[in-house]
Amino acid sequence: MASFQENIDKSSVLNRKMIVELRFKPIPTFLDKKGKILSEMEGFIPNGFWSFGELAVKISDNNVENLVRTSLAVEINRFAYVSTKIDSIQKYVDDIDSMYKALVQVFPNIEIARIGCRIQGTYKTASRKFDDVVEKFKNHFPNDLFFDGYQLKDLRLEIRHGQGMYILGPVNANDSFLERNFNYEGRNNGVGIGLDTDNFLVETSLNELNSIEKIHDVVRASLSVEKSLVDNFGAL
């Protein structure tokens, strides 16, 4: 079993979501195996609510949209596990490992074409006022980017690279970032820094993805980005 340590201090987390997505070549037998998929997967979300779509099996921990905290979906060419209840990184990864094994049990000849891991979160900053966080965030950039006479109200940094992206910026109470990504009762509406990072691997002739280890590689990449940005910008 792979070992995953907590990458950041949990006390710094206001809200956090992790998503692991596997994309694979369409499976012709999917429609015939929806019942078997459900029987293999339903134990991962105890007392969950499940549904069959024409091309998907979905399970969630609640049947009310704004109360859902954990969900998984298996589609004809895609698997996704989403959770905003991250008790520990190790537990989340162990669950992914078990889900992958269950997926292979149902579809032994699955061919993974892409592995992605996305982490979205909001994190505490030293400053508790949104305007102060914006001003300190602004100070990380050259002054030439900002024009006199225009009041800066918000700021986002977006970086795209060969194997993913990250977006970083101040988050206000009831920010649209919170509304979009943490639309459930009981979220933390505190001011802080918001992060969205998505890292991935794609299949090539030299890079075969059908292994748990490859999933771990992508998860570690996203955790590394999260740690680096939270460590560097949590002091705002």
Image: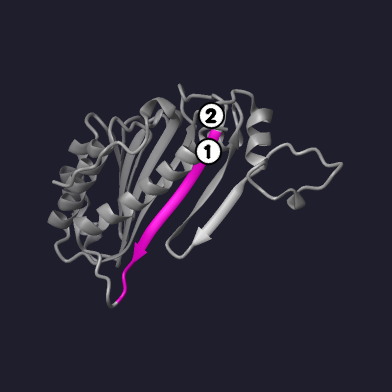
Q: Residue furthest bottom?
A: 205
Residue 218 in sight: yes
Residues at discs 2 and 1 in contact (Cβ within 8 Å) = yes
Mark 2 or mark 1: which comes first in sequence? 2
Q: Position of residue 16 (x, y in %)?
A: 42, 35
**Quadrant of the frame with the C terminus:** top right
Q: Residue furthest right?
A: 149
Instruction: Specify the amino acid type for callout 1.
Output: Phe
What residue does disc 2 label? 125
Task: Mark 2: give few (<14), some (14-19) or many (20+) Cα within 10 Å.
Answer: many
Relative horizontal placement of residue 5, taking residue 177 as reference (left or right): left
* Corner quadrant of residue 139: top right
**What residue do we see at 17% from left, 47% from top?**
2
Q: Magenta part of the protein: which range?
A: 193-204
Q: Nearer the viewer, residue 49 or 14?
A: 14
Q: Position of residue 186 (x, y in %)?
A: 45, 21
Task: Mark 1: give few (<14), some (14-19) or many (20+) Cα within 10 Å.
Answer: many
Q: Position of residue 33 (x, y in %)?
A: 19, 55
Q: Position of residue 225 (x, y in %)?
A: 42, 48
Judge whether 98 appears above or below 108 on screen.
above
* Corner quadrant of residue 199: bottom left
Residue 79 in sight: no
**What residue do we see at 27% from left, 76% from top?**
206
Q: What is the number of the mark on residue 193?
A: none
Q: Secondary structure beneath disc 2?
A: loop
Instruction: Specify the amino acid type for callout 2.
Output: Thr
Q: CA distance from mark 2 to mark 1?
A: 7 Å
**What residue do we see at 19% from left, 48% from top?**
97
Q: Nearer the viewer, residue 2 or 58?
A: 2
Q: Secondary structure beneath disc 1?
A: helix
What residue does disc 1 label? 233
